[in-house]
Amino acid sequence: MTSWRPATHEIDPLLEAVANAARATILPAVSINIPSPSTDGILSQRLRDGRELRLKLSTRCLHQKQRGPRTVIVYALLGNAVVDNRIGYQVKGQAVLDVATRAFLDIECQLEQVAPVMP
């Protein structure tokens, strides 16, 4: 069993916002510090470092499996993000949710810069 250890570095505010949005998309009741998306599904929020984020994220259930004694559901994450109306990112990743406790065991997000946004 892995024991808890404190974080060794500060998480990037952009990755933190994407991970929180993934949690809120999969389990809507987990919307801590997440504003509701607009009617077109785009989430707009100010990051804790002052940058403005616009995020469109979708999740898809991939499969259910056993992780040790726990049954988990693995979700795929896919979307697009724009920061400060200047930098565009493609978002990919996955989230692992414990079925019994509804706790997220892992959320992995990769952001690939795709291009500057044209005004």
Image (spheres, helix red, strand yellow):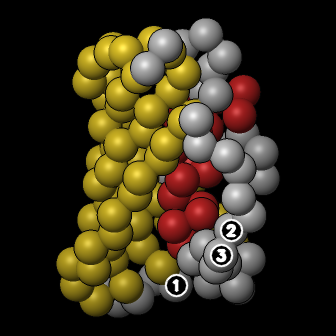
- Amino acid carrying label 2: it is Ala
User: Residue 64 at what x, y percent from top left?
Assistant: 33, 14
Q: Residue 105: which disc? A: none
Q: Quadrant of the N terminus?
A: top right
Q: Determine the residue positioned at 43% across, 39% down.
A: 95
- Quadrant occupied by the C terminus: bottom left
Please say if the residues under marks 2 and 1 sit with CB atoms less than 8 Å apart. no
| Along the viewing direction, whichever of 10 and 29 lies nearer the viewer | 10
User: Residue 84 shows which numbered tag?
Assistant: 1
- Gap in angstroms between the C-alphas marked 2 and 3: 4 Å
Mark nearer the viewer, 1 or 3: 3
Q: Earlier in the sequence, mark 2 or mark 1?
A: 2
Name the secondary structure under disc 2: loop
Residue found 29% across the figure and 54% down from its top: 92
Separation of marks 1 and 3 at Cα, in angstroms: 28 Å
Quote the CA–CA distance across marks 2 and 1: 28 Å
Q: Is residue 14 left or right of residue 61?
A: right
Residue with the mark numbered 2? 7
Determine the residue positioned at 21% across, 78% down. Answer: 114
Vertical position of residue 99 compared to residue 2: above or below: above
Q: Secondary structure at mark 3?
A: loop
On residue 8, the disc is 3
Amino acid type at circle 3 is Thr
Residue 79: horizontal and vertical position, in percent? 33, 53
Q: Position of residue 98 (x, y in %)?
A: 54, 21
Label 2 or label 1, whichever lies nearer to me, is: 2
Amino acid type shown at disc 1: Asp
Assign a secondary structure to mark 1.
Answer: loop
Q: Does residue 118 appear in this view?
A: no
Is the Cβ of the residue at disc 2 closer than 8 Å to that at disc 3?
yes
Determine if residue 6 is in view: yes
